Amino acid sequence: MIVEIALVIPLRQVFDYKWPAGWNGPKLGQRVLVPFRRQKKCGLIVGIKEKSEFDSVRQILALLDEHPIINRDLLDLTRWVAEYYFCGWGEVLQAALPGGLGVHLQSEYSWGSSRPDQNSRLPEKFAGLLNRERWTDQEWKELNPSAADEELRQSWLNSGLLKVQRHLVQQRAKIKTERWVRLKNSPSDKLGKSGRKKTKRQRLLEILLERDSVPWLNLRDEIKAPASLLKQLVEEQVVETFEERVFRRFLPQGLPVPTDFQKLSVDQQNVWTLIEQSLDSKKYNAFLLHGVTGSGKTEVYLHAVRKCLELEKTALVLVPEISLTPQLVNRFRERFGDLVAVLHSGMDDGERFDEWSRIQLGQAKIAIGARSAIFAPLQNLGLVVIDEEHDQSYKQGESPRYQGRDVAVYRAFQEKTTVILGSATPSIESWQNSRTGKYHLLELPSRALTGAKLPEVELLDLRQQPRQSGCYF
């Protein structure tokens, strides 16, 4: 069997590799390690076929994932991005994955049958290596070797004095867990006599009877129980401990106070009626929502997401800047709680990996973020929202380069969903698309609050203004 592999290189072509006999069948979206020229590279399986058009095909070295880490819809989307923007498919696939999924080769050195002569020109700082069986490339670098030292090491390798082995190291973000406690046997005979003041042992067991299982840290803080008490109960086989995964959260702990959905204005209701019909149709429709500042575009987004969840679908909401994310996220969390996940480049690898995992596992139904959130692993997508669609920040300036707004629209088209592009000042491209019928134009000409007016604009002649310190007009 032959699999097609997309490598993280600036080439749009894929490469054929032989699937090893005896392995379980390949799946699209799995990562593999393959030989490429004189190197070993990580790639993703993007195609499966019986035969290759090439006579000589090299074999896969290792399978890195038991299950696919990217779904078929995202494979199709990333392939389109690579073809449309002339970049490597593997580069786009890498951009679609969180940072905690890297792979690298670690070199480990060991002496051969003999070692360098003690009287050889070995620098003093490396003398300790003669007494060591093996060491890694990282440990060598920590000794700050000079160019001459590197030449010396290479001469040892060439002469056979030194041997090197390379091992695959996966830089997977560490899954965070916490210890939980639950009853193992009935504690009725372990509770002891009930007195005026209950012991910590009695209180702990009563809590477990009521709640089934409890995080140990919460239990410890609640009754001030020492670790020795837990150890004793485990040894007596009254309770047992187990590890439960904990998701690191970029968002503040606790949920904001829930708020009700606001009653829509007449203009908002007219807009919402058309969007609701599109969501019910489960077909691709693109809407350019042109609304003045304060017209209530976000409230329309919130109603659309609620409808999407009622249809048992997921939603993707994009904002152009990381700085805008907290404002929008807070409003969405007020309505939808922990169904909201955040993805953007300002998060560390652990937080981003956990939010990505929550989306992939289906625990989060709404993904909000900047440009990189376009590739969120949402299943059964029902809505795409692009806020401030005119903003130039949606353009990716580094390889792979793409226009995030247009990629999001194509994802909606590909998955047959509704897409809303919102702006008070639409881009020329989107405005033209609305005139030619590619987008449906929706208008919110006035502010949502009754009696609210746009800020007054006043022209000032700076030549007539008093000079101020530090002002150079």
Image (cartoon, rainbow, N blue to C red):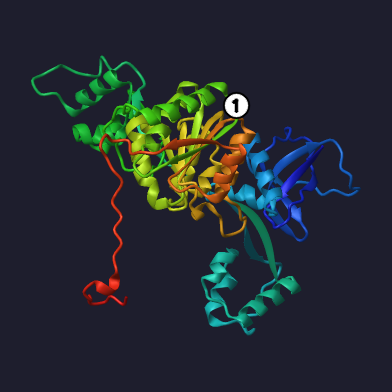
Which residue was labeled with disc 1? Answer: 283
In front here: 423 or 169? 423
Residue lying at the far right of the rendered structure: 55
In front here: 390 or 349? 390
Q: Residues within 10 Å of mark 1 (few under 14, many from 20)?
A: some
In the image, residue 113 lies at what x, y percent?
71, 67
In the image, residue 75 lies at what x, y percent?
66, 40
Give the total number of marks visible in the rendering.
1
Q: Residue at x 76, y 61 (%)?
A: 38
- Residue 220, placed above or below residue 94: above
- Residue 397, placed above or below residue 75: below
In front here: 332 or 228? 332
From the viewer's perspective, is 469 left or right of 157?
A: left
From the viewer's perspective, is 174 left or right of 256?
A: right
Q: Quadrant of the C terminus?
A: bottom left
Q: Residue at x 28, y 18 (%)?
A: 209
In the image, residue 342 lies at what x, y percent?
43, 42
The kind of residue tagged 1 is Lys
In the image, residue 149 lies at what x, y percent?
61, 79
Residue lying at the far left of the rendered structure: 196
